Image (spheres, rainbow, N blue to C red):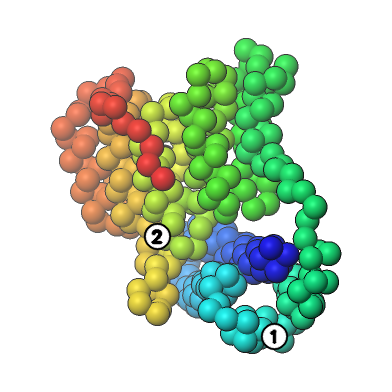
Amino acid sequence: MAIGIGLRQVQQALDNKANEIQHKFIELSDELDELTRQMLEVDDEERKVLKEKQIQLRERQLQIAEDVNVWRTRARHALQHPGVSSLRAFLHEMLELNEDLVTPAVQQALMLLDLPADERLQHEPEKVVKQQSPAGRLLERARSDFELRSSDRGVRQREAVAFANRPGMSQDQAIIDEVAAAIDDQDPLVRELANLTTLQLYRFRANRMADLDAAHQATRFLAKMNHPAVIPVLIEILKNPRVGYVQEGDESVQKDNGRSRMIVLLRLVEWHTAEAQTALRTMKFDRDPHIVKAAERALELFPGPWSGPVMRENASPES
């Protein structure tokens, strides 16, 4: 059992390294967004310079995406070795990487692996105490905290944003699933906080993740939510075309988020609110002709003021 715990710590350390690199991708995405805005405001000569910089940044993004994939693969392999010799070789390989986030966990796992069986028992936990997860603590507070149970919805909104912004929360699927499960809670205030927090967690994934397949799954979840607070998030996704990467075979391929934006556009038509209508009107000059055409068609079909929603029946989130 002790070596199993040690290997899970190695796996977590490898995932943490991948998350660290993922943040670099996010920073480059912000830089590219700013560069795109600048290109609209300068003359042709300056635009050429900015275009070259844009190409360089996207090449760096590709390398970062590949690095993230490498570390995620290493994390998956941490618990998948058929024998001790294979495991030992893997741990020594990880040790040779000399990564500060990874080395301590690897050294601990090797130490446990090298111990005689009787000595290894001394490192077994005497009692496994089930600790409440961050999501569990958040939901427990929603049931008992005076401020979170007040009539001020802004308090719950701020709490949801703060939780989603904590390092690692939006990357941890188990935490997201635990929060999302409370969307059907019997307590209305717990339900509201669960909705708002789930929304913010998936908002981060949809707008920031380099892995566009994962970002698309987050967008699909958001599109199925029936809480009105999701509307500004859907509009945010629609208005922000971006590039990322999908895994095709053994390669990371650069693509845009057009399919996610199309899902969002169609869902905004169903919400049928004034702000949704305004968002579709701004798509007239979008870079994606499919988005332009879909927005134009929706506005033609529903030319009057939008005061909806035109909702789907029994829609429920999917993970």
Residue at the (40%, 79%) spot, across then down: 251
C-alpha separation, residue under disc 2 versus residue under disc 1: 32 Å
Q: Mark 1 points at which residue?
A: 92
x, y percent for residue 139: 63, 30
> From the viewer's perspective, is the residue at label 2 or at label 1 nearer?
1
Closer to the camera in the image, 116 or 61: 116
**Dividing the picture into quarters, in which one does residue 53 lie?**
bottom right
Instruction: Name the amino acid, label 2.
Output: Asp
Task: Tell me which amino acid carries mark 1.
Answer: His
State which quarter of the image contains the N terminus: bottom right
Name the residue located 55 percent from the left edge and 37 percent from the top edge: 179
In the foreground, 115 or 6: 115
Q: Is 119 placed left or right of 59 in the picture?
A: right
Q: Is residue 13 visible?
A: no
Residue 260 shown left or right of residue 196 in the figure: left
Nearest to the observer: residue 138 or residue 81 = 81
The part of the image, by quadrant, that contains residue 108 is: bottom right
Q: In this view, does 174 lie above or below 119?
A: above
**Mark 2–mark 1 CB contact (< 8 Å):** no
Furthest-left residue in view? 301
Q: Residue 60 in the image: x percent, y percent?
A: 55, 76
Secondary structure at badge 2 equals helix
Q: How crowded is mark 1: few (under 14 residues within 10 Å), some or many (20 or more)?
A: some
Q: Is mark 1 on a helix, strand or loop?
A: helix
Q: Residue furthest top?
A: 151
| Nearer the observer, 306 or 218 | 218
